[in-house]
Image (cartoon, grey):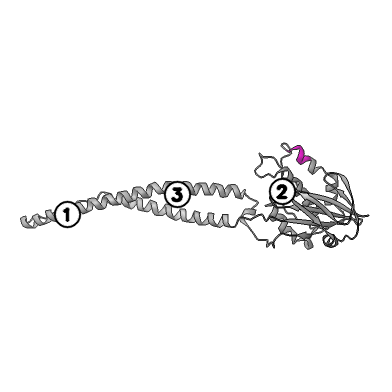
C-alpha cells in the first residue's frame, strides 16, 4: 500500500501547494502489535518520502507503544524542516526505473478495513463452507444411489405382485419411497451451498487478482526548497540491495548543475562536495534523504 500511495502521488504534484497539500495517508510505525506496521527501515523511508512530497505528517501509530527507533525518525528536525518548507512545493520524480503506473480505485486501498485480513478471513470461511459441502454431497449421492437400488428392487417385486393381483382380481399398492424426502432436502442444501460457494469463490478470485503488486525498482525524488536548496530522496522498492546514482542528467532534472554540497539528513552529517549523488540502498525500503546546496 505504501508503494501504491507513493506512485499515485507521483502524478499529483501540480495539484499540491499551500492550502491544498496531497495526503497519501498517515505515517505507519513498526509496532508488531498494531493492525498495520512497517519495518524500521520502511518507517524511515516513508518519513523521508513524506518530507519530500510535502505530505501531512500525521501519526497513525500508538504513542504508548511507539518504538524508540520510530520516535527518533519522527523527531528528526532536519527532515521536518524539509517537510515544512515555506515554498510548499511537492517534490517530483527526477529519475526512475519503475514501470508506468496507472492509479485506480482498489478494494485493497479501503480505509474502512484491513483488506488483507478480510481477504484471508473470507478465504478461510469459503474453505470451511466447501469442507462442509463435500460430506453433504457424498451423503446425497449415497442416499440417491441407495434409493435407486431399492426402487429397482421394489419395482420388480411390484410387477410380480401386480401380475398376481390381475390374476386374482385384486389391486396392488405401490410402496412409498422413503428416500425421496431426504433426497429433496439434501439436493436443496447442496444447491444452496453451491450457489453461495460460487459467489464467494468469484469474489475471492476478483479480490486476489486485483491485489496491487510491488515493482522491483528505484526512484529519486527532488523538492525545491526556500533559499535555493534542494532535497533529494532516493528509495529502493526492490527486495535486494541496490546502488543508486543521481547522475548529471538526474541532477539537472532536479535543477542542479556542477558541484554541490551534500548533507545526509538522516545521519546528520555532511557528505562533502560532488557533482553527483550516489549511495547503496538496503533491500525492501532502503532510502536516503539529502539536503543539497550549491557549493
- Does residue 295 appear left or right of residue 152 in this picture? right
Image location of residue 52, percent across then percent down: 80, 53
Identity of the residue drawn at 34% across and 47% down:
139
Most foreground residue, 10 or 193? 10
Identity of the residue drawn at 86% across and 53% down:
85
Q: Label for residue 206?
A: none
Q: Nearer the viewer, mark 2 or mark 1?
A: 2
Q: Say which residue label 3 marks.
A: 130
Instruction: State whether residue 56 appears in this view.
Output: no
Q: Say which residue label 2 marks.
A: 283
Q: Earlier in the sequence, mark 2 or mark 3?
A: 3
Q: Earlier in the sequence, mark 2 or mark 1?
A: 1
Image location of residue 183, percent across then percent down: 31, 51
SS label for mark 2: loop
Identity of the residue drawn at 53% across and 54% down:
204
Most foreground residue, 81 or 259? 259
SS label for mark 1: helix
| Distance from Cα at disc 2 to Cα at disc 3 | 40 Å
Q: Say which residue label 1 marks.
A: 156
Extent of the magenta region: 66-71
Image location of residue 14, percent across then percent down: 79, 63
Q: Is residue 138 one of those drawn in magenta?
A: no
Farthest residue in the left direction?
168
| Distance from Cα at disc 1 to Cα at disc 3 | 39 Å
Amino acid at each position: 500500500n505504501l508503494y501504491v500511495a507513493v506512485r499515485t502521488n507521483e502524478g499529483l504534484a501540480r495539484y499540491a501547494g499551500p492550502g491544498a497539500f496531497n495526503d497519501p495517508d498517515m505515517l505507519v510505525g513498526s509496532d508488531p502489535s498494531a493492525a498495520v506496521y512497517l519495518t524500521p527501515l520502511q518507517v524511515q523511508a516513508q518519513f523521508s518520502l513524506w518530507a519530500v512530497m510535502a505530505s501531512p505528517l500525521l501519526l497513525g501509530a500508538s504513542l504508548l507503544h511507539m518504538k524508540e527507533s520510530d520516535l527518533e525518525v519522527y523527531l528528526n528536525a532536519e527532515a521536518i524542516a524539509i517537510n515544512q518548507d515555506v515554498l510548499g512545493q511537492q517534490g517530483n520524480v527526477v529519475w526512475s526505473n519503475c514501470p508506468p503506473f496507472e492509479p485506480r480505485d482498489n478494494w485493497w486501498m479501503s480505509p474502512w478495513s484491513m483488506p488483507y485480513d478480510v481477504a484471508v478471513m473470507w478465504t478461510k470461511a469459503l474453505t470451511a463452507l466447501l469442507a462442509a459441502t463435500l460430506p453433504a454431497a457424498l451423503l446425497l449421492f449415497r442416499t440417491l444411489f441407495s434409493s435407486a437400488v431399492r426402487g429397482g428392487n421394489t419395482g420388480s417385486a411390484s410387477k410380480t405382485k401386480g401380475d398376481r393381483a390381475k390374476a386374482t382380481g385384486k389391486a396392488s399398492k405401490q410402496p412409498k419411497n422413503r428416500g425421496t424426502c431426504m433426497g429433496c432436502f439434501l439436493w436443496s442444501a447442496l444447491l444452496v451451498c453451491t450457489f453461495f460457494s460460487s459467489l464467494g469463490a468469484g469474489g475471492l478470485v476478483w479480490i486476489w487478482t486485483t491485489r496491487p503488486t510491488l515493482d522491483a525498482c528505484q526512484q529519486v525524488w527532488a523538492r525545491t526548497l526556500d533559499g535555493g536548496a534542494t532535497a533529494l530522496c532516493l528509495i529502493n522498492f526492490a527486495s535486494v540491495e541496490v546502488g543508486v546514482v543521481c547522475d548529471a542528467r538526474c541532477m539537472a532534472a532536479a535543477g542542479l548543475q556542477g558541484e554541490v554540497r551534500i548533507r545526509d539528513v538522516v545521519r546528520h552529517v555532511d557528505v562533502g562536495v560532488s557533482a553527483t549523488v550516489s549511495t547503496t540502498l538496503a533491500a525492501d525500503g532502503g532510502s536516503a534523504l539529502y539536503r543539497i546546496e550549491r557549493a
